Amino acid sequence: MKCINCGTDNNLKDRTANQGRCKQCNHPFAFEPTSMGNVKITDPMFAKILADISASNTLFFTPKQLLYFLDSRLRNKSFQSLQFASFYIFMNVWFTGFVGGFLSGIIGNNSFLIANLIYQVCVVIYLFKNTTSAKLNNPGRKASAKSLQRLGVLILVVGILASLFVFKSFILFVAIVIIGTSSLFLGTQQLGKIGKLTQELLISPTQLQDWLNRWEQINNAPEKILLSPRKEITPALVNPDVTAYSFDRLVVCDSSTTAQLLIANNFHFENNCAILSITGYPESIFNTTMEMLHRNPDLKVYAIHDCSSKGISLVNHIRSSDRWFLNSNVTIIDIGLLPRQIMATKRGMFIQSSPDLATTAKQLSEEVRQSLTSEELAWLDAGNFVELESFTPQRLIQILRSAIISASYNFAIDNSSMILIGDSGNDIYMVESFG
């Protein structure tokens, strides 16, 4: 492992002899991959992850965004088709020889053939479990499904020829057809389900916090990581000349964390909009900002939220709360995330499931449920959710900026590409695509 301080390569013997320090500059290593179990992190890897998620230290990010980003890097190495092919060939020979030799004293001449059939069944089961594994990412599960298809074809072609012309056994032919077609069918079936399956994080927030604490002790805290938003109840002093103006656009987030992220990265300055959370963040300027916004009859409100039974209620809260825009004709655009956007996208999103959110989904108001399709309701009722923080800061900012520009263009030219779901009072639109 290379030292991030001086670049010297230190093997395990060097690190052990120097009590976990670099042999050249004596700088401590934050991680020792050989003692970390299944999840292995090195200092250079962690430093690169911090640089990548912050776009070379230019963007702020949240701890949970770091958690998702680190998870994706670890998950990308979870299943490789070429490595599996090499392993399959080696184990095919070894398992057949070892188990067949062990069974030869019990069942005689057919022991090696039976051992090989057992091995093929085990591989089919292993690959099928991979296609449903919450610990693999979508590319890994997709690769496993394709491997199931290839294995099925291989078993059918080689097995049928061997059973008919070498062993001349009808029983073997039937067994080969069952195993091969099962593998081919399961692989094809699972390919169509990959994008709808849920996932679990490989590491916990507690683990990540322990690693961050260790990193901070040795290398200082990451410059662009955001702490939890603090409540500042005391109203901020705002120049009266400023409050005389208003904004043409407002971005409302379903959490103070998302609002803090956008503000920290100057999204409001660069896109000439106000940013508030549904919880009232930032508290010190919330009332003043709302007064300014209500002065603009042409205001457009852009809602961005998690795709969950809680997040999906954001738009309804904005238009029905007297703290926001009750009895106002303001136009509201629901950017997402929405279940229909997740179902339509070809890009895999990190879908998770929660029993608590399943209960919350069934308790959604009738008004909210009527705005969703039956497929969306079924998705939410199952407890599925996708968090905005599963996107990197750069990606999230790009999606939001693109949605605002696209919506502005559509309203100026033709809003037919957006779905109108409002009734009298507020016009509410849904954006069909999230990035």
Image (cartoon, rainbow, N blue to C red):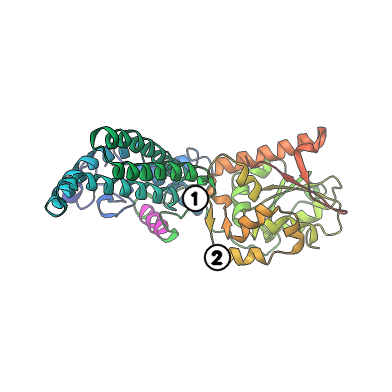
Whether the magenta-drawn stretch holds residue 256 is answered as: no
Q: Nearer the viewer, mark 1 or mark 2?
A: 2
Asked whether 406 or 250 is in front, the reply is 406
Whether the magenta-drawn stretch holds residue 209 is answered as: yes
> Would you say the magenta stretch is mainly helix, strand or loop?
helix
**Horizontal and vertical percent for residue 27?**
27, 47
The answer to whether 158 appears left or right of 400 in the picture is left
Q: Quadrant of residue 286?
A: bottom right
Count residues near mark 1 (Cα–Cα under 10 Å), then give few for <14, some for 14-19, many for 20+: some
**Horizontal and vertical percent for residue 232?**
64, 62
**Horizontal and vertical percent for residue 370?**
75, 57
Asked whether 381 or 321 is in front, the reply is 381
Mark 1–mark 2 distance (CA, rounded to whole Å): 30 Å
Residue at image position (84%, 47%) is 296
Tag 1: residue type?
Ile
Count residues near mark 2 (Cα–Cα under 10 Å), then give few for <14, some for 14-19, many for 20+: few
The residue tagged with tag 2: helix, strand or loop?
helix
**Count of numbered badges drawn on the protein:** 2
Instruction: Specify the label residue 225 is tagged with.
Output: 1
Residue at image position (60%, 41%) is 345
The answer to whether 318 appears left or right of 257 in the picture is right
The answer to whether 102 appears left or right of 317 in the picture is left
Residue beneath label 2, please? 355
Which stretch is magenta? 207-216
Asked whether 308 or 384 is in front, the reply is 384
* Quarter that holds the C terminus: top right
